[in-house]
């Protein structure tokens, strides 16, 4: 059996290793889109602020790992797929034949159509090479404009802050991490950053980027408010889109991302998809969605590989969850954090202490949550939402006093027959749990 995997991020690497475990004699080719060993985008902030070196970003620290696993690793980009002939056409002219193919090509950063966005000193923070360029310009005290305060932008903010940069955040939305947090939580994050010396400008867009005045910072960033901000570095973090352009004419259906069935198979025969390029099922809604976070990419990679190898394994859905460290303030959101259509909400708010918990119920099931400054509850929230256990009398108690979550968790876990380990340990690294799955193709 010949397996080919496009994309050498967490989804692709996990798939390759899973295939090797279940099909020891198979031919496995893993294709990465960058001239680097497979690495984790989540690790880039650690590299930027100096906690690890380049090698620390690699998904597998042993440089001979893929050779030992008999996984052929190539670098290059796919220009097209002939699904009938089962052949990949690489940009360098090589054609790869396959019996089963996994597309795990991840996503690419969006570069908004801002005049001057392609000037030297304007970077995204998506690749290892981007991180190298940022390191050349992000010196201590250097003025930096960060465009975008979503999840990815906030991760980059942490790294730039720890390097000692003078940071201005420009965000079009009315608050930070607007797709992860409500007004209360997003407002807390904004005030926390400002208390740490970061300038946060919401409801603001970048209108232009120009060369700076001679003798000063290299760039001048013009804002919709009419002011100009000098900067040695501008980092764009305004979102990503799935990397699927090479699939035109392949027979693989693409909506916002690649459409897949419950077994992560695409509309083309023997072609599967996983990770940030793929519309897997959201556990909370039961509908296809792109959950561009690393734990989902890893889960997709494993399940897709099992199905490719003939071990039927249904994907029942992934939990949308994010855990973010913003200059020392940890926030998290899970499931239907905005609330169910017909549901009830319990809140605990301590504005001065930067603490917030919001619990969302549908019937007596916990279906969503947000937290700021309360890290002890992360694993319990994940477990209760993911399992869908009925909270019974604990629902009303938690609506009145969300801080009693630990009591509720213990009570529900002990009372559930064959509950098993409800909430696996969730790490909360400084770079968070999200930030994309695959490393491109």
Image (tube, grey):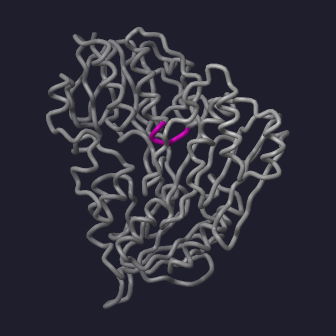
Along the horizontal axis of the image, is 150 left or right of 286? left
Residue 133 lies, in percent from the top left, at 28, 64
Residue at 27 percent of width and 14 percent of height: 2
Image-based side of 47 in relation to 220, left or right = left
x then y, percent, for residue 214: 33, 89
Q: For the N terminus, which image quadrant?
A: top left
Q: Which residue is drawn at 49% across and 15% down?
A: 313
Q: What stretch is highlighted in magenta?
A: 291-295
Q: Which quadrant holds the C terminus?
A: top left
- Which SS does the magenta portion mostly show? loop
**The magenta stretch spans residue 205:** no
Residue at x 78% of width, y 46% of height: 398
Residue 162 sits in quarter: bottom left
Q: Is residue 46 above or below residue 164?
A: above
Residue 437 x, y percent position in the rendering: 43, 40
In the image, residue 85 above or below residue 198: above
Residue at left offset 37%, top offset 73%: 233
Asked which quadrant contains residue 105, the reply is: top left
Total numbered labels placed on residues in the image: 0
Rendering coords of residue 344 (x, y %): 83, 45
Closer-to-camera residue (155/256): 155
Looking at the image, residue 270 lies above or below residue 133: above
């Amino acid at each position: 059996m010949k397996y080919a995997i496009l994309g050498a991020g967490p989804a692709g690497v996990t798939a390759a290793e899973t295939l090797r475990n279940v099909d020891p004699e198979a031919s496995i080719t893993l294709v990465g889109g960058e001239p680097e060993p497979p690495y984790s985008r989540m690790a880039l902030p650690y590299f930027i602020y100096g906690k690890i070196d380049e090698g620390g970003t690699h998904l597998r620290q042993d440089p001979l790992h893929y050779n030992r696993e008999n996984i052929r690793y190539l670098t290059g980009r796919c220009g097209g797929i002939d699904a009938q002939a089962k052949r990949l056409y690489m940009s360098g002219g090589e054609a790869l034949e396959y019996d089963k193919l996994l597309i795990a090509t991840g996503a690419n950063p969006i570069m908004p159509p801002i005049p001057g966005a392609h000037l030297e000193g304007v970077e995204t923070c998506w690749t290892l090479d981007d991180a190298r360029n940022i390191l050349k310009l992000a010196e201590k005290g250097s003025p930096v404009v960060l465009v975008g305060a979503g999840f990815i932008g906030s991760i980059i903010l942490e790294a730039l802050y720890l390097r000692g940069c003078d940071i201005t955040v420009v965000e079009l939305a009315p608050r930070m991490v607007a797709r992860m947090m409500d007004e209360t939580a997003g407002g807390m994050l904004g005030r926390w950053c400002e208390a740490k010396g970061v300038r946060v400008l919401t409801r603001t867009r970048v209108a232009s980027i120009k060369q700076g005045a001679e003798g000063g910072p290299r760039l001048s960033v013009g804002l919709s408010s009419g002011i100009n901000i000098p900067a040695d570095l501008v980092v764009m973090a305004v979102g990503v889109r799935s990397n699927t352009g090479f699939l035109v004419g392949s027979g693989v259906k693409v909506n916002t991302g690649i459409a897949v069935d419950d077994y992560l198979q695409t509309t083309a025969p023997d072609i599967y998809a996983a990770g940030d390029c793929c519309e897997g099922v959201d556990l909370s809604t039961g509908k296809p969605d792109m959950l561009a976070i690393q734990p989902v990419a890893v889960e997709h990679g494993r399940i897709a590989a099992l199905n490719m190898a003939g071990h039927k394994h249904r994907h029942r859905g992934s939990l949308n969850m994010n855990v973010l460290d913003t200059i020392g303030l940890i926030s998290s959101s899970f499931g239907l954090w905005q609330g169910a259509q017909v549901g009830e909400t319990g809140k605990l708010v301590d504005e001065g202490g930067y603490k917030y918990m919001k619990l969302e119920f549908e019937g007596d099931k916990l279906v969503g949550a947000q937290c700021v400054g309360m890290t002890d509850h992360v694993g319990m929230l994940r477990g209760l939402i993911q399992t869908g256990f009925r909270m019974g009398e604990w629902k009303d108690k938690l609506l009145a006093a969300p801080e009693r979550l630990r009591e509720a968790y213990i009570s529900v876990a002990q009372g559930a027959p064959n509950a098993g380990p409800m909430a696996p340990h969730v790490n909360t690294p400084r770079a968070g749990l999200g930030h994309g799955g695959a490393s491109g193709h």
